[in-house]
């Protein structure tokens, strides 16, 4: 069993829809959770960073962490064609948030105009 | 603010040849990472530097891969000899310090390697 599981998709939804992206993990030592967005032929860029269980909102994006179920989610409201990208979940158990990141495979998201 | 610079962007080589990638991190960033991203996979950490010292190279195939960060700024990643399975995008990333409390890595655009 891989440490981090993420459905690679592709996930195709119409513009304006609510998108739900998910990851599960097996290592209960993971404490810091991130979502990165990666456009084609570009490097990943940080979207959301969370530490505790619960929800964190930033504009149209909401990150949700459920440590008891070892499950994290990213919701995108009012999705736009510009949201089309690969979304990577990442997590770590180190004392800081950027060291030793374990990434999921990424979910390829397509927003249809 | 200039981002993380990487070169070359694309490289095609025959198996058993050697290749080197260069990275210039964001100015002032003490920590530098090299990640390998195989098509359809998430990035996998190869090596992490704090200034010019190695923090983590546990997943670096040391029989063929080497990396250095002289003077704690630029870094090079070398593969010699290359194998077919080394075909991937090599991503360089940097952050302010080891243990950055925001989880934010700043990635370059990557160097895409094809081994024939």
Image: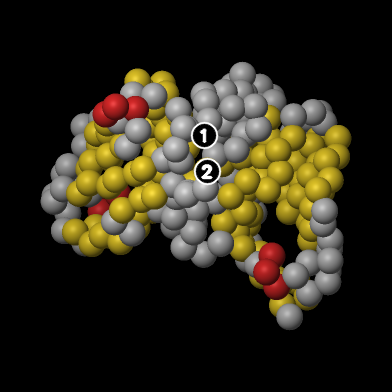
| Residue that numbered label 2 is attached to | B106
In the displayed structure image, the side of residue A22 where residue B44 appears, left or right: left
Residue A7 percent across, percent down from the top left: 64, 54
Residue that lies at the very extreme toward the left in this rendered image: B17
In the displayed structure image, the side of residue A24 where residue B99 appears, left or right: left
The answer to which of A2 and B59 lies nearer the viewer is B59
The C terminus of chain B - image quarter:
bottom left
The answer to which of B114 and A56 lies nearer the viewer is A56
| Residue that numbered label 1 is attached to | B95
Contact between marks 1 and 2 (CB within 8 A): the answer is yes
Q: Quadrant of residue A95?
A: top right
Residue B103 percent across, percent down from the top left: 62, 34
- The dot on residue B104 is none
Residue A38 visible from this viewpoint:
yes
Q: How crowded is the residue under tag 2: few (<14 C-alpha within 10 Å), some, or many (20+)?
A: many
Q: How crowded is the residue under tag 1: few (<14 C-alpha within 10 Å), some, or many (20+)?
A: many
**Residue displayed at 68% across by 30% down:** A32
Element assignment for label 2: strand
Q: Do labels 1 and 2 share a chain?
A: yes
**Residue displayed at 66% across by 22% down:** A29
| Rendered view: B47 above or below B26 | above
Q: In which chain is the residue bearing label 2? A: B
Q: In which chain is the residue bearing label 1? A: B
Residue B66 percent across, percent down from the top left: 24, 34
| Rendered view: B103 above or below A110 | above
Element assignment for label 1: strand
Q: Distance between the residues labelled 1 and 2?
A: 6 Å
**Residue displayed at 52% across by 48% down:** B1
């Amino acid at each position: 069993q891989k440490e981090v599981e993420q459905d690679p998709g592709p996930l195709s939804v119409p513009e304006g829809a609510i998108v739900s992206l998910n990851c599960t993990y097996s290592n209960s030592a993971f404490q810091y959770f991130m979502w990165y967005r990666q456009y084609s032929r570009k490097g990943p860029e940080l979207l959301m960073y969370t530490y505790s269980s619960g929800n964190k909102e930033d504009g149209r994006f909401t990150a949700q962490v459920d440590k008891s179920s070892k499950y994290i989610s990213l919701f995108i409201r009012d999705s736009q064609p510009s949201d089309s990208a690969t979304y990577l979940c990442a997590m770590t158990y180190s004392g800081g948030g950027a060291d030793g990141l374990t990434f999921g495979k990424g979910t390829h998201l397509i927003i249809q105009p | 603010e200039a981002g993380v610079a990487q070169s070359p962007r694309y490289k095609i080589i025959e198996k058993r040849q050697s290749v080197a990638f260069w990275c210039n991190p964001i100015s002032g960033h003490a920590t530098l990472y090299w990640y390998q991203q195989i098509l359809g996979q998430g990035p996998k950490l190869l090596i992490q530097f704090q200034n010019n010292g190695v923090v983590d190279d546990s997943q670096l195939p040391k029989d063929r891969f080497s990396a250095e960060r002289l003077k704690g700024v630029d870094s090079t990643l070398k593969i010699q000899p290359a194998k077919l399975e080394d075909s991937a995008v090599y991503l360089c990333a940097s952050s302010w310090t080891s243990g950055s409390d925001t989880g934010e890595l700043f990635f370059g655009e990557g160097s895409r390697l094809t081994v024939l």
